[in-house]
Amino acid sequence: MVTGNVSVIYLGGFGRSGSTLIERVLGAVPGWVNVGELVDLARSVAPHDELCGCGATFSTCPVWTRVGDVAFGGWTQDVLDRITAAHRAAARQRHLPGLLLGRPPSPALASLRADYSLIYHAVAEVTGASVVVDASKGPALGQAIAGAPGVDLRMLNVVRDPRAVAWSWQREVARPHDVSGTEQMWRIPAHRAAAQWGALQLEMAAVARRATAPSAQLRYEDFVADPISSLVAATAALGRPVSADQLPALNDGSIVLHPSHGLSGNPSRFRSGPVRLRRDETWTQEMPRRARAVVTTVTFPLLLAYGYAGRPSRHDTLTGAPDALDRRIPT
């Protein structure tokens, strides 16, 4: 087992914000590895034997099989049940205030931290990586893991225009992780997506203010406009800088990605080869006016804080906003 600290870049925020793509690009950096949404390993991926990003089922993926062996002697039902129960008891959204206040860890929180530490160390040992990229997104889980022994966790808040996010949550999308081939991605109405997006961004701001772990912010729109510069800036802000030549090369708006062993997340998890980066502004044309108005109203203060007020200009689409990493929600 790898000894010492394992560096973890934890992508926080709300789903459908581009975290799967960003996680995969970071996982392509030499010495870095992406694991997908690790939060789903015990509660859905392993129990349903879902597909790994490499295309194999979880139970037959050589990397995850080896990780389980190194960490626990195998992914037994007892291990999966323990992790799932500890997460429910200590790292849900309702637990964030206590985590931010630094209250003494409960037995469940101590158990969760110990198990995540074992998993991260096993991933580092099996893959030979020094940095693990986890796109689990939940602020409470990230704050909980930040106190895990031997884990140096840094949080990257991935933000996307909430109107684009809400529109994505309403679309019917097949979920290829499911081996049956019949499952659909979860859908939620626009008003609920807006409320959850706002709540999670406020939570990410609270985590950043507490400064228990280094944090930075990255707008998905800026990443798409200039992936190399935006990730160089974001990783530097996190204190784990990567250089432009360590990132996959950008060629005519596309970036080449190889298969990885990431779990869960967006269907783009399974796309390899040249992947075209696009902002996806279909919501500006197809999103019903009422739904758009609801999302805009609910999230308006944060739209202003993140530079999303009004329709994006062509200049923003092509160049991004260079000061996006410096924006913070007003306190």
Image: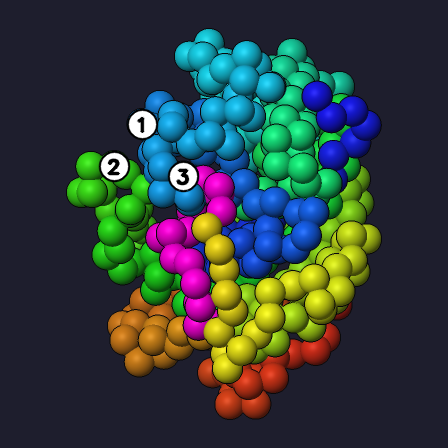
Label ID, residue 40: none
Q: To which residue does mark 3 refer?
A: 52
Q: Is 24 situated above or below 77?
A: below
The image shows residue 150 at horizontal and vertical percentages of: 77, 27
Quick check: 102 left or right of 196?
right
- Residue sitting nearer the eye, 264 or 15: 264
- The residue nearer to you, when weighing 28 against 180, is 28
Q: Are marks 1 and 2 in contact (CB under 8 Å)?
A: yes
Q: Which residue is mark 1?
A: 48
Q: Is residue 165 visible?
A: yes
Q: Amino acid at mark 1?
A: His
| Residue 125 in the image, given as x and y percentages of width and height | 67, 30
Q: Quadrant of residue 57?
A: top left
How many marks can you see?
3
Q: Secondary structure at mark 2?
A: loop
Compared across the picture, whether 101 is left or right of 296 comes to: right
Q: Is residue 147 above or below residue 7?
A: above
CA separation in Å, label 3 and label 2: 10 Å
| In front: label 1 or label 2 | 2
The quarter of the image holding the N terminus is top right
Colouring scheme, one of rainbow, by chain, secondary structure, one colour: rainbow
Range drawn in magenta? 260-277
Residue 179 is marked as 2
Of labels 1 and 2, earlier in sequence is 1
